[in-house]
Image (cartoon, helix red, strand yellow):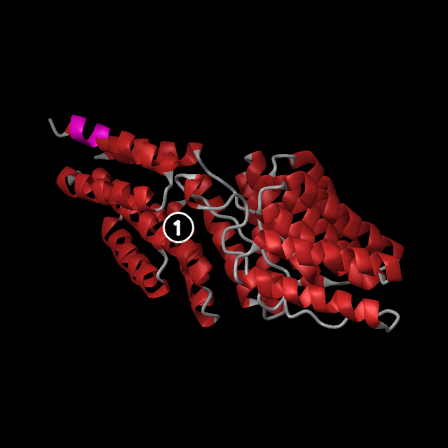
């Protein structure tokens, strides 16, 4: 049994995927998730919430029909984004961008660059996303908008981290931290410290990551930011797990879960449940791991989220494998394979089939 647990933990540690979020439009969002496999999630943007960000206000600038048309296009793009029509969203926002450029509305221009940067990133078009975010940062610098610079640098830094450019990400985030401290913006400082924690995590400096996240939590609590705090506590749990401190990780995930429930934040609840399952499993404490799984599937059913159901099936199969119940493990792997096929997740299906083959071999 110990051998199986070590094999499982080793496989998970090889696959730690840090899913950094972009803190768009001066709304500090942060997310980092350790998963056994990344196929379950869009790269880098698991559960990013945009509802408040897409309440598009009228921008400042010269009044007139062209600018009002640009504002309308921005709002239409927001509606399209909510429905998941990302290509159509880009079309609206690119039209708005051109109008803002023609009328010289720099605030509208910067706002639209932000939206486009996130949307390109969500589509996996990272070079275009980085270009938009750099342009947004350029507008903020021209306007001497320090807050815009801080969040622009955070956006760019997290995108660079997402694409594996750790050194450039660190440089961008370090600059953001310096600006935040120079203007005494502790809320932005909390966001930036949390993102810098992700940099240290990616570098393998897990104890430095823990320090950054703990410092960020102090500031996020001070400013009453439960969503940001939940994200950072989940990040802290990931760092504790990577540092082989599963009991500390479980406490961090538990607090993240409590915070996420206060804001009905389902993505962070899912992250916390997954973290709890893995942390308890690594600690050899199986009953609470099974209880966390029960809560995970209950939330997945309530949210009608098939991808989270797939995660639950896979985690259940792995946990039963570790506990030596190969019959149940086989059953869950077979269900997971069926659901992966329904979701057309061929990569995950292949991995699940490989795991099932190992279970069948052990059961001989």
Which of the 4 image quarters holds residue 29?
A: bottom right
Residue behind mark 1? 275
Quadrant in which the N terminus is drawn: top left
What crowding class fits label 1: few (fewer than 14 Cα within 10 Å), some (14-19), or many (20 or more)? Answer: many
- Spot the residue most to the left: 364
Q: Nearer the viewer, residue 169 or 69?
A: 69
Q: Give how far across and how far down residue 148 sits, in percent.
A: 77, 59
Q: Give how far across and how far down residue 315 sits, in percent.
A: 30, 45
Q: Give how far across and how far down residue 59 sits, in percent.
A: 78, 69
- The answer to whether any part of residue 310 appears in the image is yes
Is 153 situated above or below 37? Answer: below
Q: Nearer the viewer, residue 240 or 103?
A: 103
Is 99 situated above or below 72? Answer: above
Residue found 54% across the figure and 67% down from its top: 226
**Residue 360 magenta:** yes
* Main secondary-structure element of the magenta-colored stretch: helix
Q: Nearer the viewer, residue 222 or 67?
A: 67
Image: magenta residue range = 357-361
**Residue 45 magenta:** no
Residue found 30% across the figure and 50% down from its top: 312
Q: Nearer the viewer, residue 291 or 103?
A: 103
Residue found 29% across the figure and 46% down from its top: 339
């Amino acid at each position: 049994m110990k051998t199986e647990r070590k094999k499982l933990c080793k496989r998970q540690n090889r696959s730690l995927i840090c899913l950094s979020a972009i803190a768009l439009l001066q709304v500090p969002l942060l997310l980092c998730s350790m998963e056994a496999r990344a196929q379950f999630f869009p790269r880098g943007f698991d559960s990013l919430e945009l509802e408040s960000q897409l309440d598009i206000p009228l921008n400042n600038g010269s009044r007139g029909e062209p600018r009002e048309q640009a504002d309308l296009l921005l709002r239409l793009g927001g509606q399209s984004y909510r429905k998941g029509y990302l290509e159509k969203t880009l079309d609206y926002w690119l039209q708005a961008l051109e109008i803002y450029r023609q009328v010289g509305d720099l605030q509208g221009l910067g706002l639209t660059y932000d939206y486009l940067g996130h949307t390109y990133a969500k589509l996996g078009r990272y070079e275009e996303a980085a270009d938009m975010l750099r342009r947004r940062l350029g507008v903020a610098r021209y306007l001497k908008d320090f807050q815009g610079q801080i969040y622009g640098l955070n956006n760019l830094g997290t995108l660079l981290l997402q694409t594996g450019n750790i050194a450039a990400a660190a440089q961008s985030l370090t600059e953001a931290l310096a600006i935040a401290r120079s203007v005494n913006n502790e809320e932005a400082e909390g966001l930036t410290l949390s993102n810098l924690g992700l940099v240290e995590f990616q570098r393998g400096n897990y104890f430095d990551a823990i320090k950054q996240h703990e410092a960020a939590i102090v500031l996020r609590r001070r400013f009453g930011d439960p969503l940001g705090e939940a994200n950072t506590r989940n990040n802290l749990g990931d760092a504790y797990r990577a540092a082989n401190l599963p009991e500390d990780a479980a406490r961090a995930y538990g607090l993240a879960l409590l915070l996420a429930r206060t804001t009905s934040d389902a993505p962070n609840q899912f992250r916390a449940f997954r973290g709890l399952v893995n942390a308890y499993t690594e600690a050899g404490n199986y009953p609470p791991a099974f209880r966390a799984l029960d809560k995970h599937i209950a939330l997945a059913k309530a949210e009608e989220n098939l991808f989270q159901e797939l995660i639950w099936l896979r985690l259940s199969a792995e946990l039963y494998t570790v506990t030596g119940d190969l019959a149940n493990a086989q059953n869950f792997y077979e269900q997971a394979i069926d659901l992966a096929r329904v979701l057309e997740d061929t990569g995950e299906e292949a991995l699940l089939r490989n795991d099932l083959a190992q279970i069948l071999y052990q059961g001989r």
